[in-house]
Image (tube, helix red, strand yellow):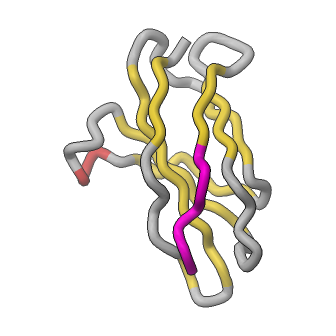
Amino acid sequence: MTPVKKLSCTSGDHDGQLDLAWDRHESAGSYEYQTTANPMDPASWTTRGSVTQSKVTLSGLTSGQRSYVRVRAIGPLGPGPWSDEASKMVP
């Protein structure tokens, strides 16, 4: 499994929301996504959930705080590597 490509992070429709989107991975059955406020601390990443589409809206984030996100594809042989990080100031 190769890393997810072209992860984008944009402001959501409401305060405390971010919209994530990425290129669909042809052999992925689902995607797992994580967030952190401190990407330099590997233990700070929190798994937020999994989806079967190549987009998701994150809710309940702290407005005014920068949030870092990453995604990985999960296929028949298990999870692939994490994508490059994307970040955005939460509205």
- Main SS, magenta region, reads loop
The location of residue 43, given as percent across then percent down, is 24, 52
The location of residue 74, given as percent across then percent down, is 62, 73
Magenta-highlighted residues: 1-7
Lateral position of residue 31 relative to residue 79, left or right: right
The residue that appears at 44% across and 41% down in the rendered structure is 35
The residue that appears at 67% across and 87% down in the rendered structure is 76
The location of residue 53, given as percent across then percent down, is 79, 55
Residue furthest toward the front?
6
The residue that appears at 56% across and 24% down in the rendered structure is 60
Q: Is residue 51 magenta?
A: no
Q: Is residue 6 magenta?
A: yes
The location of residue 83, given as percent across then percent down, is 48, 58
Between 24 and 79, the one lying in front of the other is 24
Lateral position of residue 65 relative to residue 58, left or right: left
Q: Quadrant of residue 79?
A: bottom right
Lateral position of residue 68 relative to residue 22, left or right: left
Q: How many marks?
A: 0
The N terminus - image quarter: bottom right
The residue that appears at 39% across and 22% down in the rendered structure is 66
Q: Quadrant of residue 15?
A: top right
Q: Check the image and report above or below for 79 versus 23.
A: below
Q: Check the image and report above or below for 58 versus 50.
A: above
Lateral position of residue 38 relative to residue 30, left or right: left
The C terminus - image quarter: top right
Residue furthest toward the bottom?
77
Q: Check the image and report above or below for 40 versus 42.
A: above
